[in-house]
């Protein structure tokens, strides 16, 4: 038997589930095909029969496979391609993507600070922010969960719009606001229990985390967010020869 897979903080059956689901996404097994029998998968993953069965149960619960005695395990459906998450690398692209999402507010705090983001050395926090946790839906499915703070004065100018629409779109339409710095950092990690529930994924599933900070002409942070996208696979496309974007302009241009 091969050594078992091990990833810190993850239960073994979730690891097996994630690998098998990724193979379905990549087309290793097509709809109608029979997957390898249980003993073969046990040998490959170095896992017990119970562990592999638990992983297969998750796939079956999603409607991706069907297990039948005497026939084996057949592929019933291929995971939807929108599990690929494209991370925007320009403000124009980010705004375009946000036009297709619908926010749902989970909670709101009128007297709050910033989420856990790292501020550049030349930027400072405002005195007070309105902080919200939200789920963004796309085609009626969870697209991301977001923890964001908006400078209080800015929020009060467009309170209803910020509660009902993506924040960056509202900021884009504010003629008084001039954003001169917009930065984001991407990392890949595992979903915690709360995130998994909101995103409709299994706890421990891979997620893409983006930490985003926007500042005005005075170097004051007007928007900061930690955005978590559910995805086994992340697509990040950049033109490596594109000219650098000047920061002394409105970030939405």
Image (cartoon, helix red, strand yellow):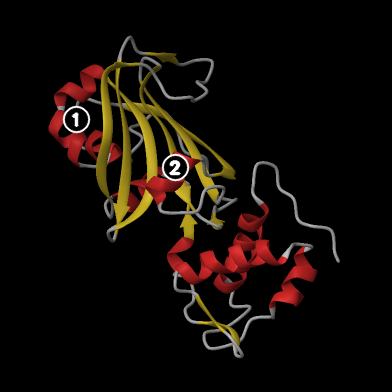
Task: Please report whichever mark, 1 or 2, sits nearer to the chain's N-terminal start.
Answer: 1
User: Does 48 sit left or right of 27 as displayed?
Assistant: right
Q: Residue at x 43, y 45 (%)?
A: 90
Up/down of 205 relative to 176, above or below: below
Between circles 1 and 2, the one closer to the viewer is 2
Q: Can you name the residue that lies furthest to the top here?
A: 127
Say which quarter of the image contains residue 221.
top left
Across and down, in percent, residue 242 comes to 53, 49
Q: Which mark is residue 175?
A: 1
Nearer the observer, 218 or 150? 150
**Which residue corresponds to mark 2?**
195
Q: Give the secondary structure at mark 1.
A: loop
Up/down of 214 relative to 72, above or below: above
Across and down, in percent, residue 39 comes to 75, 75
Q: Residue at x 19, y 35 (%)?
A: 163
User: Does 120 sit left or right of 176 as displayed?
Assistant: right
């Amino acid at each position: 038997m091969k050594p078992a897979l091990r990833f810190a903080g993850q239960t073994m059956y979730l690891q097996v589930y994630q690998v098998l689901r990724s193979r379905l996404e990549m087309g290793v097994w097509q709809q109608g095909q029979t997957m390898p029998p249980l003993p073969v998968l046990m040998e490959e993953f170095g896992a017990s029969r119970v562990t592999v069965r638990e992983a297969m149960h998750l796939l079956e619960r999603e409607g991706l496979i069907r297990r039948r005695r005497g026939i084996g395990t057949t592929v019933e459906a291929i995971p939807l391609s929108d599990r690929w998450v494209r991370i925007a690398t320009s403000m124009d692209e980010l705004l375009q993507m946000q036009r297709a999402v619908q926010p749902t507010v989970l909670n709101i705090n009128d007297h709050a600070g910033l989420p856990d983001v790292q501020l550049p050395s030349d930027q400072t926090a405002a005195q007070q922010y309105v902080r919200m946790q939200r789920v963004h839906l796309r085609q009626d499915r969870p697209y991301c969960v977001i923890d964001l703070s908006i400078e209080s004065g800015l929020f009060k100018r467009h309170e209803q719009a910020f509660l009902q629409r993506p924040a960056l779109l509202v900021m884009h339409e504010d003629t008084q606001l001039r954003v001169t710095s917009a930065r984001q950092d991407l990392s890949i990690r595992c979903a915690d229990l709360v995130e998994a529930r909101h995103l409709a994924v299994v706890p421990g599933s891979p997620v893409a985390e983006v930490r985003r900070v926007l500042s005005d002409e005075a170097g004051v942070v007007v928007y900061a967010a930690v955005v978590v996208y559910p995805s086994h696979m992340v697509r990040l496309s950049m033109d490596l020869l594109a000219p650098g974007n000047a920061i002394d302009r409105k970030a939405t241009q």
